[in-house]
Amino acid sequence: MNPLNHIYKPGSGAAAVCMGHPGADEAPPFPMECFPPAMADMARAIAHTERTPETLAGCCILGIVSASIGAGLQVRSGPDRVTRGNLFLLASGDSGSGKGETFKHVARPLQEFERAAVDSWKIHTKPKVDTAKAILASRLKKLEKDAGRATDLIAREDLRGEMELAMAELVQAEADCHPPALTVDDTTTEKLAVMLQNNQEQLASISAEARNIVDNVLGRYSDGATDEVIYLKAYSGDSCRVDRMGREPVTLQRPCLCCLWLVQPDKVQALLAESGLTDGGLIPRFLICHTRAQPRPIVDGIQGIPSVIADAWGQLVRQLINAFRIASESVTIEPGPEAWQEMKGHFNRIVERRLGDLRDVGSYAARWNEQAWRIAVCLHAGLHGEDAGKRGLDVETARKAIAMADWFAGEQLAILAGGRHAARQNLLDQVMGLLVNKPQGIQASDVYRTRIVAFADEAHALLGRLEAEGELVGTDTKPKTGGHVTRIFTKTKK
């Protein structure tokens, strides 16, 4: 028996929405059962202690595991393709609903590790670098004086070569003089590129209140033009160059960025309303949900998070950071045959629906299987900890990753529902407008030629859907002289 059957029952919840069944009126619960024990226990304990929805804690747990892995763990997701575990998560909750408290509990071990690394750098590394800089600066001053007094051309050229070498060493020393970072909060694109360059091209953008980050992406520092290119590149690991005014450009070879942004609901809508972010591909890369976290009253008798649960969570995060996030090389895990078949089946089901009822949200659906692979890396890491690189991806982890990806897909469709309805109504109005001039009936070629849709097969699919919904009546006709059968559509008589 599939152990996920008790999580998602056919015909209900987010998985049902994703797979095309009518969804329940009540929002489906976060699929906590998909998490390995250390992740699930911590999420449930936080939700209980802070009286917040499990969805909020679940998103934070998933995001921090992703941040703790960075680019250090990936899965072979195709014959010539690997997929990393870096996720982009965007979760909303009302102001004063416990976002900050939940985030602090989850992020604490990652932030403590980062603070310890910075403290160690201040004590052991920075003094050495500062000393080297001072020696080089003093040496440059002496070489400059010697060059100024030199009268021999050969001696002057020798001194110039020494000065160039010393200046290069000083520039490198200054470039190396930066504290280590695992995370970043509110920053510009230029600064983000520099920080990636200085930290193995890996960072996690995490924030309990990401309003300013969202504003930056929406164009706060770029005259209103969206500023998302580096996020796109660092999601997929593509090389990019970021030019900076008055400074050398930053070139990144294979950047890796994780995002965990908690925002108020209006910021989710602001991002969705910016068509360029959807068309450019940034928003479809995000796992988006409304956590439905709301202000809550104080309740007597609530116990804190049990230390054994918090300790297990902290140990998992530290293991993952040491084994993967700060490792010099990434490790690739291999999916077992059954896991591969599960992922392939998931991909093919989505492709089938992208040719049908999901045409209008194809840019979103195109990412769902990739998200399942990415989530699988995180669940695999949460299950095996520092040994994750030594184990293959098993079928149960693959199934759980698919279930979780389907849950996020259902949340995504629910958030997009209003815009999808308006877009569909607009298409219906345009088709009905054609029938005003051609009451005898229209065919798919009429819809395509008037550019109501971009492709001929979309025209056939649109008219077929309107017929299935009862808006049109379709009749097959064949010329008396023979030839292909044509389906003519007329308005339903009501």
Image (cartoon, helix red, strand yellow):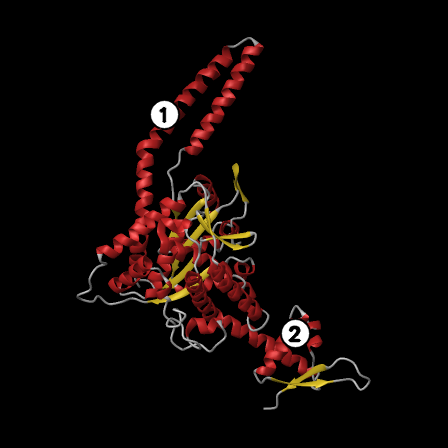
Where residue 120 sits, quadrant-wise, is top left
Q: Residue at x 45, y 26 (%)?
A: 170
Q: Vertical placement of 230 versus 477: above or below?
A: above
Of labels 2 and 1, earlier in sequence is 1
Taking the image as drawn, is residue 280 in sight?
yes
Q: Amino acid at mark 2?
A: Ala
From the viewer's side, name the closer residue of 54 and 360. 54
Residue 213 appears left or right of 351: left
Q: Which residue is mark 2?
A: 459
Q: Which residue is mark 1?
A: 131
Residue 485 appears left or right of 280: right
Quarter of the picture containing the C terminus is bottom right
Q: Residue at x 71, y 72 (%)?
A: 449
Q: Residue at x 66, y 72 (%)?
A: 457
Percent from the top left, x then y, of residue 290?
A: 40, 66
Q: Residue furthest right?
A: 481
From the viewer's side, name the closer residue of 329 and 471. 329
Percent from the top left, x then y, of residue 84?
A: 47, 52
